Image: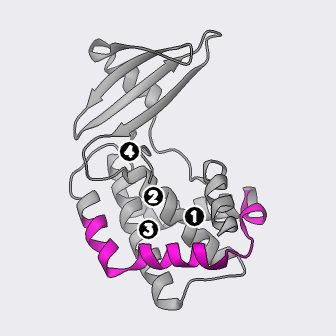
């Protein structure tokens, strides 16, 4: 189980390339941006998006700017689902362990489905017909940049998690999460 926690800790490093240009969204919709107080000494600007998405631009005291997106739709943060499925598929491909063959096939199919959603709803939007090339490029980057750090014996925790995400029951959760087009933000993530 400890290795599963370590794998989750690596997700911010291993996450696929961001599919949301937050700066461009804020620039295009600057008239709708509202002040949101401050968090940890950083001024917050808020922008409400369709589908129950709230974007935050955090402006630090030294001019640094960071962004986050929060999905309040109740359907689940699709960006989080993308990161989880991507990581499990990458580990299954490049690490010594692999999920059982049937579960691995389900994880890969679901990742492609989520990636299409992300490509269509990201900013800028991308052609979902390029999903295979997109995922292969991201897998190559993952293997090069973090694969050796992420590939440890996952123990039963990670394999159990992969099994849960490949389960028939989670298929309904995924159907719900992908039922409404919206910006594929990553928060809240499980």
Residue 87 is marked as 1
Residue at left 37%, top 49%? 77
Query: Quick check: is 185 in the magenta stretch?
Result: no
The residue that mark 4 highlights is 122
| Cα distance in 3D space between marks 3 and 4 | 15 Å
Q: Where is residue 169 drawn, in percent x and y? A: 30, 76
In the image, the segment drawn in magenta is 146-175
User: Which residue is more in the foreground, 16 or 70?
Assistant: 70
- Label 4 neighbourhood size at 10 Å, few (<14), some (14-19), many (20+)? many
In this rendering, which labeled residue sits more in front, label 3 or label 4? 3
> What sort of colour scheme is used for the picture?
one colour
- Circle 1 packing at 10 Å, graded few (<14), some (14-19), many (20+), is many
Q: Secondary structure at mark 1?
A: helix
Residue located beneath label 3 in the image: 111
| Front label number (2 vs 4) | 2
**Which residue is painted at 38% across and 80% down in the image?**
167
**Marks 1, 3: nearer the viewer:** 1
- Identify the mark nearer the N-term, 3 or 4: 3
- Residue 59 placed where, x, y %? 53, 15
Quarter of the rendering containing residue 25: top left
- The answer to if 169 sits in the magenta stretch is yes
State whether residue 18 is above or below residue 113. above
Secondary element at tag 2: helix
Q: Which mark is residue 82?
A: 2
Q: Secondary structure at mark 3?
A: helix
> Are the residues tagged 1 and 2 within 8 Å (C-beta)?
no
């Amino acid at each position: 189980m400890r290795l599963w926690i370590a794998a989750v800790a690596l997700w911010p490093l291993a996450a696929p390339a961001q599919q949301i240009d937050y700066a461009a969204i804020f620039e295009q919709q600057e008239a709708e941006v509202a002040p949101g107080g401050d968090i940890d000494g950083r001024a917050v600007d808020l922008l409400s998006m369709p589908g129950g998405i709230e974007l935050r631009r955090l402006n630090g005291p030294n001019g640094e700017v960071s962004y986050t997106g929060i999905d309040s739709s109740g359907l689940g943060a699709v960006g989080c689902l993308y990161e989880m499925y991507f990581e499990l598929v990458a580990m299954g491909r490049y690490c010594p362990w692999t999920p059982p063959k049937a579960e691995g096939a389900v994880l890969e199919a679901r990742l492609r489905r989520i990636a299409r959603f992300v490509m269509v709803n990201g900013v800028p939007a991308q052609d979902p017909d390029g999903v295979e090339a997109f995922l292969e490029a991201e897998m190559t980057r993952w293997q090069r940049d973090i694969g050796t750090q992420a590939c440890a014996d996952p123990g039963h925790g990670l394999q159990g998690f992969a099994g849960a995400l490949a389960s028939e029951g989670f298929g309904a959760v995924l159907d719900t999460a992908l039922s409404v087009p919206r910006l594929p933000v990553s928060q809240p993530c499980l």
